[in-house]
Amino acid sequence: MRKPVIAGNWKMYKTIAEAVDFVTKLKPLVASAEHCEVVVAPPFTALRAVADAVKGSNIAVAAQNVHWDKEGAHTGDIAPGMLREAGCTHVIIGHSERRQDCGETDEQVNRKVKAALAAGLLPIVCVGETLAEREAGKTQEVLERQFRAGFAGLTPQDFSRIIVAYEPVWAIGTGRTATPEMAAESHRFIRGLVRQQLGEGVASAVRILYGGSVKPDNVKGLMAQEEIDGALVGGASLKVDSFSALVNFPQA
Ligand code: PEP
């Protein structure tokens, strides 16, 4: 049994005060959610305050990025140990916005994943094709390239602490969701890659989240797919009512 994860990626939204207010309101609404893990990913500035505010609750805190070095001359970057110190347990790595805005490569994703694991963080690693790639029939080729380079050199033990997020770029923030069947097809493909590289045990245990315009009105259909183990949510994670509705998604 894979326990679903519902993770909210707040991107560059929310001040410290807004972030603390959000989780203070969220806590009682998700307190009885035992069917899934709940993660929020505030901007760096709000991590410590949010981690303090969720202490003792079932809400975990993720950062949205991490550097691979323990420390060094990397202006504007944050080291894995610093995220631990700020109260993070998870970190999102390789989000398509970072790949697009900052030119993040699969090799960098790989270094970040290894560094995060070494520091005791649980990586949520994003993969996904652009619209042009999908229309050119290259979805699986892209996923395979991102997977093989991004997850190179990882052991089954490493993989037991990794969460994968399949996020087709054309569905992020656009209101265009992949149909549950389309998403499940890519999830199956990714799980097949895990199987090839790390064996059946790891493949059947790894959680693969779907991300791309997940909302309270489409979550049920997505979560009904056996292959979909939760959601990485942007827009709908910014409001307490929609995010709590996602966490408390109607189960069959
Ligand atoms: C995301 O940012 O990871 C995401 C899936 O965003 P949205 O839910 O807004 O499409």
Image (cartoon, rainbow, N blue to C red):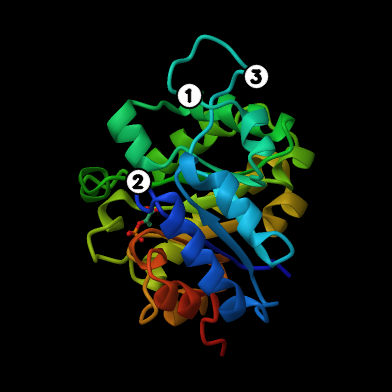
Please name the residue that numbered disc 2 is placed on: 12
**Pointer 1 or 2: first along the chain:** 2
**Residue 64, position in %: x, y?**
48, 42
Instruction: Say which of 37 and 13 sits in front.
Output: 13
Q: Residue at x 79, y 40 (%)?
A: 157
The residue tagged with tag 1: helix, strand or loop? Answer: loop
User: Answer yes or no: do the residues labelled 1 and 3 have beta carbons within 8 Å?
Assistant: no
Where is 64 relative to 71, above or below? below
Please name the residue that numbered disc 3 is placed on: 70
Q: Which mark is residue 119?
A: none
Tell me how far mark 1 sits from mark 2, CA to CA.
15 Å
Q: Quadrant of residue 18?
A: bottom left
Please name the residue that numbered disc 1 is placed on: 77
**Pointer 1 or 3: first along the chain:** 3
Q: Locate the N terminus by quadrant.
A: bottom right
Q: Name the kind of residue labelled 2 in the image.
A: Met
